[in-house]
Amino acid sequence: MSRRGCTRAATAMAVVVCLTLAACTVPSQREATDPAKLAITTERVDAVYATYRDIRDAAVEVLDPKPLSVVERGAVLAIDSGAFEVAQQGSVEPPTTPDLRVDQLVVPRFEQYPLWFVSVASEPGAATRRVQVFERERAVDPWFLVASPEIVAATELPRLRTSGEATGVAVDPTSAAGMPLSAQEAAEAYTRALTSPEGDPAIAEDDFIAQMRDAAAQNAALPDVQFSQAWQVEDVQHVLRTADGGALAFVTLLRTDTYEVTPGRTVTWPEGTAQRAFLADGITGTGGLRFNHQVLLQIPAGSTGKPRAIGQFGGVIGAS
């Protein structure tokens, strides 16, 4: 690396160290320490995004996802780490830091930790928007990005229920009050819809299901390969009530693609693909890839409607 490149990398890592230390001193700056209050004040949201952008810029500068653990958790961190690993191979463009601006802020009221809020954010002129969940598990913790499904910019989100100063109302993920299914039941039914070619009668067919079926069909058509796919769902944590009595649920899925290759054969993928980054030598025998997908499920009010995904974010997170 050139002296200039070393200087840039050292500077970026110094920024990460400073920001990490700042995150550890959150108690001196925290707001809403009484969990009976709103999750966050509007004035503090800009600071949360500013810190996030600084940390991500530092990670991009050194092309290393480790700094992201200061501001991301769970599937978001796993997906972004996978994207960085692909970029480290040098065959795809490195990740960037989107200059997101909050278009809509949804702040529920909580009586106990964890606290969380939702923001709908976009870049000027972009074709998509992010519906993001930031969470704080304890008063001494910083805010972590834990969900970030993407929706088409033209998609109209349903109007959300409010309560006094709270611009959102959190829903128990196991409660089906006013809806055909609870958020957890809807998430489990959604995995069945993805697993079965016939879908699930409780779930509406949507673009994400069609996209996943097309990808599975392409993999199944590979010569000398027996392909299988399995889906699992995490416990749902973040659900918002819509004004009509339905809900928006943030659902995290784990997808596992398994390839059983005919003896004497090897399956490989082209340069620039996530598969090549994680399986550089291809697959001989049996191997697979793991993916995380976050979907934004809209659950209708009443007893007869069907949940459907209106947004998603995902990527490869590992190989076996």
Image (tube, helix red, strand yellow):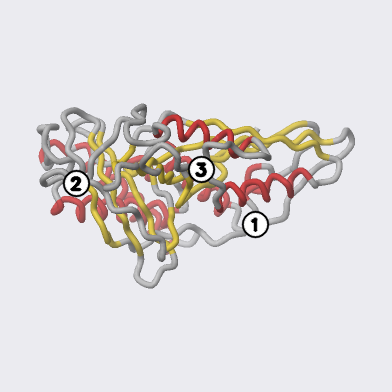
Task: Tell me the distance, in whole angstroms, between the alpha carbons under discs 3 and 2.
Answer: 29 Å
Question: Residue, x 11% and y 45% (percent of image)?
Answer: 164
Question: Residue, x 41% and y 57% (percent of image)?
Answer: 61
> Three-letter amino acid code at disc 3?
His
Element at badge 2? loop
> Three-letter amino acid code at disc 2?
Thr
Tag 2–tag 1 contact (CB < 8 Å): no
Q: Position of residue 174 (x, y in %)?
A: 36, 27
What mark, if any, has residue 70 been given in the picture? none
Q: Which residue is mark 2?
A: 162
Q: Which residue is mark 3?
A: 293
Task: Tell me the distance, in whole angstroms, between the alpha carbons under discs 3 and 1.
Answer: 20 Å
| Residue 288: quarter of image | top right
Q: Position of residue 163 (x, y in %)?
A: 15, 43
Element at badge 1? loop
Question: Residue, x 78% and y 33% (percent of image)?
Answer: 260
> Three-letter amino acid code at disc 1?
Gly
Tag 3–tag 2 contact (CB < 8 Å): no
As drawn, 312 above or below 116 = below
Residue sitting nearer the eye, 86 or 230? 230
Label 3: few (<14), some (14–19) or many (≥20) C-alpha neighbours in 10 Å:
many
Q: Earlier in the sequence, mark 3 or mark 2?
A: 2
Task: Tell me the distance, in whole angstroms, between the alpha carbons under discs 2 and 1.
Answer: 45 Å
Q: Earlier in the sequence, mark 3 or mark 1?
A: 1
Assign the C terminus to one quadrant of the image: top right
Residue sitting nearer the eye, 44 or 157? 157
User: Which circle, 3 or 1, is nearer the viewer?
Assistant: 3
Label 1: few (<14), some (14–19) or many (≥20) C-alpha neighbours in 10 Å:
some
Element at badge 3? strand
Q: Which residue is mark 1?
A: 272
